[in-house]
Image (cartoon, rainbow, N blue to C red):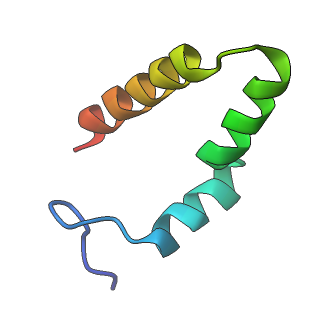
Amino acid sequence: MAQPIIGRPVSEEVWESVRAEFALPALEQVRRRLAELMEDPDPVMRQLVRVFLSGLNRLC
């Protein structure tokens, strides 16, 4: 049986499996795509990261 990961750092291997399973693009892929669509993607990137981190807090 796998050991629980609560309270431990999440490895890059785990993040890769989450991206693969849920088809989450890498942050740099999102930044590149937004840069194609707008002059300054930073405000949107900050919102995306904030939403993502807020969702993680509910999981912990």
Q: Position of residue 49 (x, y in %)?
A: 45, 30
Q: Residue furthest right?
A: 36
| Relative depth, front residue between 21 and 40 | 40
Left or right of 20 on screen, residue 16: left
Left or right of 26 on screen, residue 3: left
| Relative depth, front residue between 47 and 51 | 47
Please identify the quarter of the rendering in which residue 39 is found.
top right
Q: Position of residue 13 (x, y in %)?
A: 50, 74
Q: Is residue 7 above or below residue 59?
A: below
Going 59% across and 66% down the picture, which residue do you hit?
A: 17
Please identify the quarter of the rendering in which residue 41 is found.
top right
Q: Is residue 21 above or below residue 28?
A: below
Going 44% across and 32% down the picture, which residue do you hit?
A: 52
Q: Is residue 54 above or below residue 37?
A: below
Can residue 24 be seen in this snapshot?
A: no
Q: Is residue 16 above or below residue 37?
A: below
Q: Quadrant of the N terminus?
A: bottom left
Task: Give the mark count.
Answer: 0
| Relative depth, front residue between 4 and 55 | 55
Going 50% across and 62% down the picture, which residue do you hit?
A: 15
Can residue 43 be seen in this snapshot?
A: yes
Q: Quadrant of the C terminus?
A: top left
Q: Residue furthest left?
A: 7
Going 69% across and 60% down the picture, which residue do you hit?
A: 20
Left or right of 26 on screen, residue 1: left
Q: Residue furthest bottom?
A: 1
Q: Residue furthest front?
A: 39
